[in-house]
Amino acid sequence: MKHLEDIELVTLTKSGNGHAFDILINRYQTKVTRLVYRYVQDTDTAMDLAQDIFFKAFRNLKKYNGESKFSSWLFRVSINESIDYLRRIKVRSEKSLDHFRETGFEVTDRGADQDIAGNFETAQERQHIRQALEELPSQLKTAIVMKIYQDMTFDDIAETLEIPVSTVKSRLYKALHSLGGVFRQRSFIEKRGQL
Amino acid sequence: MNHLKEEEFIDILMGEPHEMALRNHLDQCPECLQQFRVLERGLEAARLVEPQVPPMPVRLLSHRRFGRQKSLRRFFWLAAAAMLTLSILGFRVEMGSGRFMFQFSMLGGSSQAQEKRLAVLEQRLFEALELNAAITQSQLNAHLNTFYQERDEELDTFTQALGEKMMDLELKNAQYLVNVKDDLSHQIGIRRSPKGALQ
């Protein structure tokens, strides 16, 4: 049964074959957990949420009509659950610049020891960028997560979110423009301060 | 000059297939180039703070666990529905002195006893209504009597006061008339000549 396509496994699950759904879980568990982690940035929370996502998918499998890929439908559920989770706990209010000044940058940050073109040198700058990213509207942040972090194609993103490809690109444009503009403004202010 | 659209910027930035004319325009248009630089910095920034996903331990998930969760929920709702139904039926459990007693008060048991009980309750209800009506009428009569009494007393007081006022006004009026008559008489006396002839 492991060689079957997603849609065939879904059909089997709907007819009462629970083992077919176990295969789907094995197939997508890591991807879903990693995707959720991009939002919640905590291993235990990501694993708990992933379990809830698969339970929700199992319960609502009758709503999946096969018009889109199963993975797209599953990722959509995952993104919605992640965003809902963040809204519930209000992650932004629990963090503060002071906390990050004390603890420094997270060790999981890529490029912590790198200096990309000398533009992002201090941990404070990275924290500023991270904060700007977290303050983005969820739609724009999702565009960055799915395209830049998950490296999905624009077509897959469009199918997952059920929006046109042009809208995906437009959201990514706005997100990157916002991040780039924030940093540019801050650099300008810092340079003026140094003069 | 038509500047690049947002999607075209993204196509160039992310290496998506695009026409060479777009790239040429970017090289020749300072405004578009400036915007593109901002996007480049945004992309760099996003990649710099990309959360590194640590190795995730694989948690054993199975549809069986979901099935148990579903069963538990279904059991809960069935139990709640059963309790509600039983309470509507008047099911009652009494415990005491080491014994149990189950009782249905609406269904089952003797129907004659039920009717008798209902008849007694009906009679009691009518008596209560009559008593209530009687009490209400007597209270109403008492209220009305009090009201009439107060009205009469106030009317007497008002009539007396009115009479006194009128007498007072009459006296004043009479005094005024006397004064007027005196004045007139005085006037007439002045106009008469000393010999008594009118002028």
Image: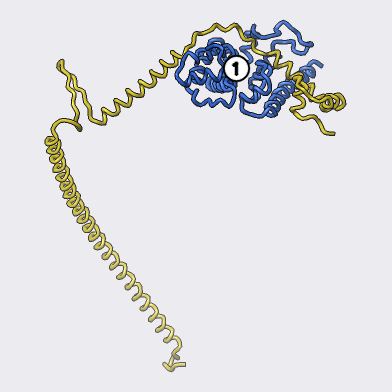
Chain colours: A blue, B yellow
Q: Is residue A96 above or below residue B146?
A: above
The quadrant in which residue A86 appears is top right
Residue B94 in the image: x percent, y percent? 19, 22
Residue ID for mark 1: A39
Residue B137 in sight: yes
Label 1 resides on the chain identified as A
Between A18 and B176, the one nearer to me in the picture? A18
Indicate left or right for A99 with B26 as reference.
left
In this rendering, the count of numbered labels is 1
- Which quadrant of the view contains residue B71? top left
Q: Nearer the viewer, residue A72 or B147?
A: A72
Q: Which of B67 and A89 is in front in this view?
A: B67
Q: Residues within 10 Å of mark 1 (few under 14, many from 20)?
A: some
Q: Is residue B139 left or right of residue A193?
A: left
SS label for mark 1: helix
| In the rendered image, the vertical position of residue B100 relative to residue B179, given as above or below | above
**Residue B94 versus residue A23 in the image, above or below:** below
Quadrant location of the N terminus of chain B in the rendered image = top right
Mark yes or no: residue A90 visible.
no
Task: Tell me: A87 left or right of B29.
Answer: left
Q: Nearer the viewer, residue B4 or B15?
A: B15
Q: Quadrant of residue A107?
A: top right
Q: Which x, y percent locates residue A151?
A: 67, 16
Q: Where is residue B31 in the image (x, y as percent from the top left)?
A: 83, 28
**Residue at image coords 70%, 26%:** A169
Q: Where is residue A130 in the image (x, y as percent from the top left)?
A: 66, 16
Please determine whether, in this image, residue B48 is positioned above or below residue B199.
Answer: above
Q: Tell me the kind of residue under disc 1.
A: Tyr
